[in-house]
Image (cartoon, rainbow, N blue to C red):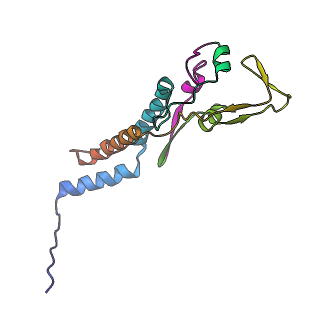
Amino acid sequence: MATMLVVEVNDVQFAQAMKRLTELMADMTPALRGIGEYLASSSQDRFGTQTAPDGSAWTPLSNWYRETKPSNKDKVLTLRGYLRSSIHWQVMPDQVLVGSNLEYAAIHQFGGVIRPKKAKALKVGGRVVSQVKIPARQYLGISAEDATESEELAADYLAGAFKDGPA
């Protein structure tokens, strides 16, 4: 003979909390705003630590470029601070985007080779060269700490469903 246990929750407060949870999950925009702000700040902090999201150090500057660099000679990607200050976030209906709209942002994130488009050579740091190889120096991305903080921000937002009154 089979045994079955049926549990029926007939609690108005629980039902209201579930309704609020469903409503909160339908619009995660407030949580995503907090996550976007946090991730943009974390990405900007990487310019100070000179590390990628995984904690690895950025490839140092070449000796010849460091010697001719007009300022911040000991730091990578910090000539004038434009790249760091260009990092922003944008909330979409179900995601948050973090990045930079600067034309040269991608070459620093992913690395690559820069070749002249209209001239026969490039002038970089007082040298004339046919091309410049830029190593990837990831400043965007989610570290383990970023993932934990983002999860906590989302959980805190959703926990509002279980507080007394409307979320």
The C terminus lies in which quarter of the figure? Answer: top left
The N terminus lies in which quarter of the figure? Answer: bottom left
Which residue is at 23% across, 58% downward?
15
Q: Is residue 128 above or below residue 53?
A: above
Identify the residue at the far top of this view.
Answer: 70
Identify the residue at the far bottom of this view.
Answer: 1
| Residue 128 position within the rendered picture, expressed as x and y whole percent measured from the top left | 79, 22
Out of 113 and 26, give the one closest to the viewer: 113
| Residue 105 position within the rendered picture, expressed as x and y whole percent measured from the top left | 62, 32
Which residue is at 40% across, 42% downward?
147
Which residue is at 33% across, 54% downward?
22
Residue 73 part of the magenta segment: yes
Tell me which segment is drawn in magenta.
Answer: 71-92
| Residue 112 position within the rendered picture, expressed as x and y whole percent measured from the top left | 68, 37
Residue 79 part of the magenta segment: yes
Viewed as shown, does residue 43 lie left or right of 1? right
Viewed as shown, does residue 48 lie left or right of 127? left
Which residue is at 36% across, 39% downward?
149
Total labels: the figure holds 0
Q: Is residue 142 above or below residue 2?
A: above
Identify the residue at the far front of this view.
Answer: 63
Out of 53 and 135, give the one closest to the viewer: 135
Viewed as shown, does residue 56 lie left or right of 161? right
Out of 167 and 141, give the one closest to the viewer: 141
Residue 117, picture quadrant: top right
Viewed as shown, does residue 1 lie left or right of 86? left
